Image (cartoon, rainbow, N blue to C red):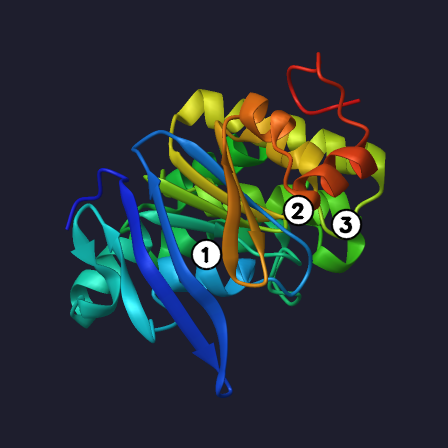
Amino acid sequence: MELEGRIEVDDLHARLGGREVLHGVSLRVEPGEALAILGPSGCGKTVFLKHVVGLLVPHRGEVRLDGVAVHRMDPATLRSVRSQMGVVFQGGALFDSLTVGENVAFPLRRHRRLAEERVQEIVAEMLNLVDMAGTQDLLPGELSGGMRKRVGIARALVLGPKVVLYDEPTAGLDPVTARAVDRLMAFLRERTRTTTVLVTHDLLTAFAVADRIAVMEAGRIVAAGSREEIRSSRHPLVRAFLESSAVSETQGGGRS
């Protein structure tokens, strides 16, 4: 199945440990569009993302990729679809025993039949793209948090995915490093025009990267729209995010 990159979520309900975590979430993401799911910790953002990847099966409702329900895909189709999706995990999820270069090359070696020379060329290109040139031989333990995020992004993009998913990409980073990662994600999104979904508790990240923002509270979408529409929302949670992030009415790109 060749992905175009359209994501449709209809009345998604999720239960974990007997507790309902998502309550009727419905969203659309068009090919090439970037959507941020913004919300506090524990509101269901990561559970939502796991349904998009097909790691969890809905209790009710469905997630469709290009019109096909993810939880109804046969194993071969799901493997094909996942090979066209890049996922940036919250902690980077790098293999500690592999070098930076080996981490970035891992998807290539798993999903492509390429000469080793070509693998090394692609790895070098991707690391240069995320400002990590020359780090191939380092181990993840030798990297800062921001550097690990960049390597994780390079690995997620190495197969040229049609869909990229970010799980709390700036969590645990200091403000300066977080804003640098924001700029990198925005740059890569403009360069690749891939469908992008990021879940975050950081309003500045959402404003920097996304075309639209959906605000989640306790497993429900309580507000959604463009940056301008989110700025003008009167919902208490949205106002709390705006006030805590000091986002001005005249700001255009996610940094104060």
Residue at image position (74%, 31%) is 179
Q: Residue furthest top?
A: 250
Q: Nearer the viewer, residue 95 or 170?
A: 170
User: Vertical placement of 156 versus 179: above or below?
Assistant: below
Q: List the residue tagged with mark 1.
A: 106
Label 2 to label 3: alpha-carbon separation = 6 Å
Disc 2 vs disc 3: Cβ atoms closer than 8 Å? yes
State how far apart marks 1 and 2 are (Cα): 16 Å
Q: Secondary structure at mark 3?
A: helix
Q: Earlier in the sequence, mark 1 or mark 2?
A: 1
Residue at image coords 41%, 26%: 192
Q: Amino acid at mark 3?
A: Gly
Q: Which mark is residue 145?
A: 3
Q: Nearer the viewer, mark 3 or mark 1?
A: 3
Give the residue type at disc 1.
Phe
Residue 174, given in percent of the width and then of the height, sits at: 85, 42
Amino acid at pointer 2: Lys
Is disc 1 surrounded by few (<14), some (14 to 19) or many (20+) residues within 10 Å?
some
x, y percentage for residue 162?
A: 32, 39
Residue occupying image coordinates x 22% and y 43%: 3
Q: Residue 104: where, in percent of width, then height? A: 52, 49
Per the image, the residue denoted by label 2 is: 149
